Amino acid sequence: MKRIFCLPLFLTAALAGASALPAIGQDVGAVCGTNALTLEAAIRLALDHNHDLRASAARVEAASGRAQQAGQWSNPELEFSAEDWPVDQGDGFSDAKQLIGISQSLPYPGKKSLERRIGGAGVKWSGQELALRRTEVVRDVKAGFYRVLAAERMVEVTGQLVRVAESAAVTARKRVDAGAAAFQEQLRAEVQLEQARTEQAERQRDLATARQVLVALLGRPEMKAVRLAGGLTEKPDAALLEVKEEDWLTGHPSAAAARATVERAELEARRARLEKYPDVELGVAGGRVGATDESIVQLGVSIPLPVLDRGGGREREANAHVEAARADCLAVQQQLQREWTEARERYRTAMDHVARYRERILPKAEEALRLVQTGFEQGKFGFMDLVDTQRTDAEVHLAYLEKLFELNVAQAELEALLQPEVSSVPISN
């Protein structure tokens, strides 16, 4: 009978890991030396190995290459020509005017400068996209890390609940065999045992899924069985709710990327307005005139005439892109404002739920179990009343873990919007 009363102690032990998370400034090597993965180490692994981040970093490099190439002039052309070649003479080539020279395209002033600036705006946009991907990866790693921690605690609680249910089923069977209880009591105990086993299997499946998601974010699938260090924080950071919108909105990578898009569109519009002004083709050549062997120099200038195509369509297109980019920039700011409002509300709600469970619901569930235990020992309550109350107490603890998980995820979302310093950690090459 004593084993039946052990559930609160088991649950307390299962929840003992719900302490504050380690600070992001800890030494990673020292923590990893314990053969356990900390949150900070997980974040750094993701920043080093996440495949999406590596793809984004490669796109930044590609944009840098395009920007470098945009500032280059076209290569000069080497030209060789033979003119006035008599074809009715055996040595006609010697009598021809022979020239060798080079030609170079000279872009209209301002075109190359704008193209270089357009390339620079593209690099800036790619860099902000990479920063946004980093922020999202850090947020997702935190959420995945918290989910694994919560799932582990839930597996522990359901495991203890299964053991309690097994003990209850054995006790009920003995009571029925001894004639101290009806067979219905044994059936109810066995039903609760099957329910506990089913719930444990579901929690174990959730844990396996959570681990798969986490190691995929880390880019290290071989670490699916690694032990995690730390726990779900039960102490919310109320200072996050006091941050003002203007303190973070303009610095968010999404807003910065939108501004870079506007800048690039405006530069492309200015470049399109120069399209109607033609580039000049300049050439110089030297040679000799036939058999006289007289030296000559030939100069050439070629200027396209903007008669049929004055670039009006390209200019209209570029101006439309500017308007679209400006509208998108405003839409991004409004979206960030909505996300901030929703994230704050989720965090505030999660704080309230955790506080209510910790201060009111959990104490009441534990007190109810204590009273039923005492009453059962005094013969005031039946055996199944005690078993039902024990299960209710376990369910309350599981619900509390769910609320703790929601609190930690909501905090990670707020931190992602506020751009914590860890999001700026460079990716190793």
Image: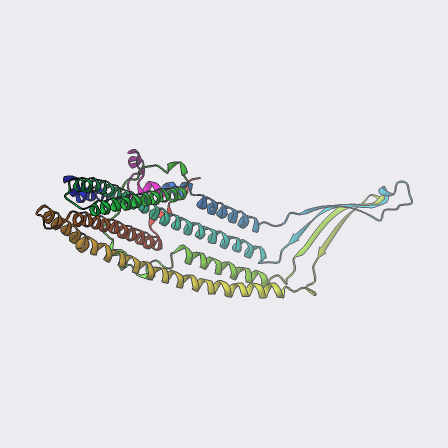
In terms of depth relative to the viewer, which is nearer, 113 or 362? Answer: 362
- One can see residue 23 in this view: no
The magenta region covers 25-43
User: Does residue 335 appear left or right of residue 309 in this picture?
Assistant: left
Percent position of residue 197, x then y: 29, 43
Residue 351 position within the rendered picture, expressed as x and y whole percent measured from the top left: 24, 56
Left or right, 256 with respect to 170, comes to right
Q: Residue at x 47, y 47 (%)?
A: 56
Quadrant showing the C terminus: top left
> Residue 156 location, x and y as percent?
26, 42
Q: Residue furthest right?
A: 88
Residue 13 lies in quadrant: top left
* Residue 408 located left or right of residue 127: left
Q: Is residue 117 magenta?
A: no
Residue at the front extreme of this rendering: 179
Residue 42 among magenta residues: yes
The x, y position of residue 327, in whole percent, is 47, 65
Nearer-the-camera pick, 282 or 427: 427
Q: State the residue in front, 392 or 88.
A: 392
* Residue at 28% over, 44% down: 194
> Taking the image as drawn, is residue 359 in sight?
yes
Disc count in the image?
0
Q: Quadrant of the N terminus?
A: top left
Q: Quadrant of residue 353?
A: bottom left
Viewer-proximal residue among 109 and 319: 319
Give the left or right position of residue 263, taking residue 176 as reference.
right
Q: Which of the colour schemes (rainbow, by chain, secondary structure, one colour) is used? A: rainbow
